[in-house]
Image (spheres, helix red, strand yellow):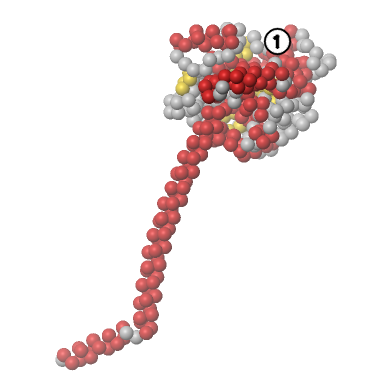
């Protein structure tokens, strides 16, 4: 009985040692090892990709912080700090010579009037995309189909290449972040205004104080901004530029408060006179969510801010945000561009309009802005808010 079992065992061993069987075993072992190695490599690659993605996200976040710092309200202390730094490190005579040269350029160059230092490279810089990305910013047109994609071509008749326009942007907020749609022409911004109407060459009007602070002055001039005065804006329109204005002005920064939408428009008719004297249609623009970008100063600082505004024509910005200190909160901004409001053609270009016509057109504009706000506020989550028209002579 033991001999047959031994013979059976020998036959099984001989089968296992056949070349074909050994080849199959080696192939199976190799496949298993390869699968295990592939799984390990794939897992390592996935971890590497996740690590690269995290590093890229942090890098872009830091870049956004840099862009918002150099173009936002913090640029004022940065400019002053630069002057103080140069005063400390340079010999006094060299510092005085440098300061005199800079002040002379500010006073005599005329770049803030002519726009002669506009930089195409700066206006098309891809880095400006950091601003709309930070706010998840979107631009919409005031149409009857409010829920459709605003990038469709159903509103191609909004603007004509043969006309110039005056874009009146509201509110000012503590800082007018919505202006980016007007002075940055980079298509990477996904900006329907400049993508669908590339013939619009928009000149941004800014307060003269911005053109007297180092760093901010150079950025404004490079972006094609000009001093917001009647003479300068009339010249820009005559040259064929459309213009964009923060009509609320510095007073708008003082009345900015989270949760309250204010437009400083009562007794502010200069932009209406400009439209009537040049025949340029008025385009109301409202930035929903802008007033919620910063926490503003406490009430006990209001007297100090009013003093600065009345005597220096500059609203002292005192602000902070809940998460990012000096950077704005990342609340969503929705910019709605209203339909152009036609104005009567002047008898001669640049003629001064009569007060009655100005008053009627001003009232018509306020009504159009209110309708624009009421029509879209529910769409963007502000259905419980109302637009308050503030007196420019008594904004406080």
Image label count: 1
Q: Position of residue 178 (x, y in %)?
A: 59, 27
What residue lies at 72% left-to-right and 30% top-to-bottom? 201
Provide the secondary structure element on which disc 1 rests: helix
Q: Residues within 10 Å of mark 1 (few under 14, many from 20)?
A: some
Q: Is residue 363 left or right of residue 14?
A: right
In this picture, residue 1 sits left or right of residue 273: left
Q: Quadrant of the N terminus?
A: bottom left
Which residue shows up at 57% across the image and 27% down it? 71
Q: Quadrant of the C terminus?
A: top right
Q: Which residue is mark 1?
A: 359
Q: Residue at x 39, y 72 (%)?
A: 30
Q: Is residue 33 visible?
A: yes
The image position of residue 17, as x and y in percent, is: 32, 84
Quarter of the view holding residue 273: top right
**Measured along the vertical axis of the image, is residue 197 above or below residue 90?**
below
Q: Which quadrant of the view contains residue 229?
A: top right
Q: Who is closer to the viewer here, 79 or 209? A: 79
At horizontal 44% and vertical 48% (from top left) the residue drawn is 50
**Residue 329's x, y, as percent?**
48, 28
Of all residues, the one furthest to the left in this rendering is: 1
Reply above or below: 311 against 89.
above
The x and y percentages for residue 105 are: 68, 21
Q: Is residue 279 above or below residue 45?
A: above
Instruction: Please tell me whether residue 306 is drawn above or below residue 95 in the rendered image.
Output: above
Nearest the viewer among 313 and 376 is 313
| Residue 171 visible to the viewer | no
Residue nearest the viewer, comparing 182 with 1:
182
């Amino acid at each position: 009985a033991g001999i047959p079992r031994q013979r059976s065992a020998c036959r099984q061993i001989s089968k296992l040692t056949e070349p074909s069987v050994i080849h199959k075993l080696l192939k199976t072992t190799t496949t298993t090892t390869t699968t295990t190695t592939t799984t390990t490599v794939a897992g390592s690659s996935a971890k590497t990709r996740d690590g690269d993605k995290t590093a890229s996200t942090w890098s872009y976040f830091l870049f956004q912080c840099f862009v918002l710092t150099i173009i936002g309200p913090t640029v004022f202390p940065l400019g002053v700090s630069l002057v103080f730094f140069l005063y400390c490190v340079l010999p006094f005579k060299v510092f005085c010579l440098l300061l005199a040269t800079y002040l002379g350029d500010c006073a005599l160059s005329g770049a803030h009037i002519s726009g002669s230092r506009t930089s195409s490279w700066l206006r098309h810089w891809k880095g400006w995309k950091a601003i709309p990305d930070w706010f998840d910013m979107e631009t919409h047109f005031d149409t009857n189909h409010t829920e459709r994609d605003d990038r469709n071509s159903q509103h191609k008749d909004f603007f004509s290449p043969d006309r110039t326009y005056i874009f009146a942007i509201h509110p000012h907020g503590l800082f007018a972040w919505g202006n980016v749609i007007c002075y940055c022409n980079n298509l990477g911004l996904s900006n329907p205004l400049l993508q669908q109407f590339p013939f619009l060459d928009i000149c941004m009007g800014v307060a003269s104080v911005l053109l007297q602070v180092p760093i901010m002055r150079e950025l404004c001039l490079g972006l094609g901004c000009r001093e917001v005065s009647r003479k300068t804006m009339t010249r820009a329109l005559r040259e064929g530029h459309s213009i964009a204005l923060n009509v609320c002005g510095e007073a708008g920064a003082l009345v900015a408060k989270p949760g309250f939408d204010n437009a400083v428009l009562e007794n502010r008719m200069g932009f209406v006179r400009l439209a009537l004297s040049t025949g340029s249609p008025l385009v109301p623009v409202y930035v929903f969510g802008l007033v919620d970008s910063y926490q503003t100063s406490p009430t006990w600082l209001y007297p100090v801010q009013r003093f600065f505004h009345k005597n220096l024509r500059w609203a002292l910005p005192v602000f902070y945000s809940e998460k990012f200190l000096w950077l704005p909160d990342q609340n969503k901004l929705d910019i709605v561009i209203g339909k152009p409001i036609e104005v009567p053609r002047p008898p001669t270009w640049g003629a001064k309009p009569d007060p009655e016509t100005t008053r009627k057109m001003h009232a018509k504009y306020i009504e159009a802005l209110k309708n624009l706000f009421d029509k879209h506020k529910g769409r963007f989550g502000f259905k419980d808010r109302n637009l308050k028209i503030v007196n420019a002579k008594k904004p406080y």
